[in-house]
Amino acid sequence: MGVYESLGVRRVINADATLTRLGGSLMPQEVLEAMQDAARAFVDMHELQLAIGRRIAELTGNEAALVTSGAAAGLYLSAIACGLTVDVTRDLSLHGKQRRRILIQRVHRISYLPSVELSGADVIEIGDELGTSEGEFGAAVDERTLAVLYVAGEHLSGGSIPLEKVIEVAHARSVPVIVDAAAQLPPVDNLWRFTRDLGADLAIFSGGKGLRGPQASGLVLGRADLIDVARAHAAPAPVRGRPMKVGKEEMCGLLIALERYLSLDHAALSVRYEAMVQRVVEVLSSAPGVHAVRDWPSEAGQPIPRAKVTVPGRAAELRQALWRCEPRIAVAQPDDDTLLVNPETLCAGEEEIVAERLLALLQ
Ligand SMILES: *Cc1c(COP(=O)(O)O)cnc(C)c1O
């Protein structure tokens, strides 16, 4: 009996997304092996952290890298990195500092901002739901500004000032730019595009989303001086970032996940996703009153197709019925009329199960 069965916790076929509440992603065999290997010996954690950081920086064409316990921890440590120094005995908090505003375009408002505010920084939204003008943004970058947080993703780009422009304006006033790219893999070149190519100071990624590393891992890439500060305020030392401890298993698992990700045949993976989506569309084409098509891009604006199933007025009811199946099936439901089937988190053959179950419910 598996651990989930022994607890009475049901397994889920995940056709929704790399969601934390569903377990993020599934680690490939080589990542599991790396974690097991790491678990078998004691090491000097500081030495390991530095060595892994150097290797990841090399692999991704960045100056430096830090493994964190997730992208949200990366947001916190990036804010700390912009506001404090490596001297952890001197700098305790961003509270009370003159520069402690982190600017974000209103259209970039995400639910993870409390992790930024935990640093003591004040998050200030610029513009409105329709967008932010360059004038408004330029005026907001002042002597109180600690950093600008830019949330990457095609789905958020409407009405927002492009990253290139944000970097130009912020850097002209010596203000660093942090890119939250937690769910922006694929495409793989985002690992160096925001920082090395476009000049952002830090970029943050989740380890447990597209990378398929440990669920409790994340990555901060970018400027060495800032990453030195973030590292100084992170575990293993008993400092402010200590509650976000990263284990040796997560560090090694994430490194191997990254190596694997860099060597993947991304074109072949796209072909596989297209075939899965095509299969779902095909199976559902025979269902009465249903319209199923290939849709693009993914919920996080990534270059991944998905099946969009239009079921007028019945989306919530069908989503719940799928969730009650054994095993449970999770799909996305953006509105009352639509279900989305995302191939990224499906294991081989599961697209068939999702499509057949949905077809049965529709008949
Ligand atoms: C998922 C996500 C996060 C949080 O990432 P974790 O690795 O789960 O901590 C932060 N920002 C964005 C935009 C995300 O999509």
Image (cartoon, rainbow, N blue to C red):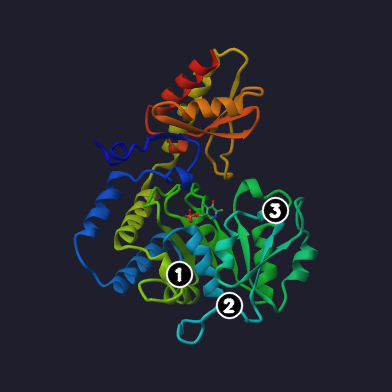
Query: Image check: 100 left or right of 196?
Result: right
- Residue 63, numbered circle: 1
Cβ–Cβ under 8 Å for marks 3 and 2:
no
Counting residues from the start of the chain, the first of labels 1 and 2 encountered is: 1
**Spot occupied by residue 173 in the image (x, y as percentages of width and height):** 68, 76
Identity, as a three-letter code, of the amino acid under mark 2: Leu
Q: Is mark 2 within 8 Å of ligand 1?
A: no
**Spot occupied by residue 163 in the image (x, y as percentages of width and height):** 64, 59
Q: Residue at x 45, y 25 (%)?
A: 354
**Spot occupied by residue 142 in the image (x, y as percentages of width and height):** 72, 76
Q: Residue at x 45, y 86 (%)?
A: 89
Question: Alpha-carbon distance for marks 1 and 2?
Answer: 25 Å
Counting residues from the start of the chain, the first of labels 1 and 3 encountered is: 1
Identity, as a three-letter code, of the amino acid under mark 3: Val
- Residue 94, numbered circle: 2
From what the image shows, is residue 106 above or below residue 121? above
Mark 2: secondary structure: loop
The answer to whether residue 196 of the structure is visible from this angle is no
Q: Residue at x 35, y 49 (%)?
A: 260
Figure quadrant of the N terminus: top left
The crowd level at tag 1 (other Cα within 10 Å; few <14, some 14-19, many 20+) is: some
The answer to whether residue 302 of the structure is visible from this angle is yes
| Residue 36 placement: quadrant | bottom left
Front-most of 204 and 96? 96
Label 1 vs label 2, nearer the camera:
2
The crowd level at tag 3 (other Cα within 10 Å; few <14, some 14-19, many 20+) is: many
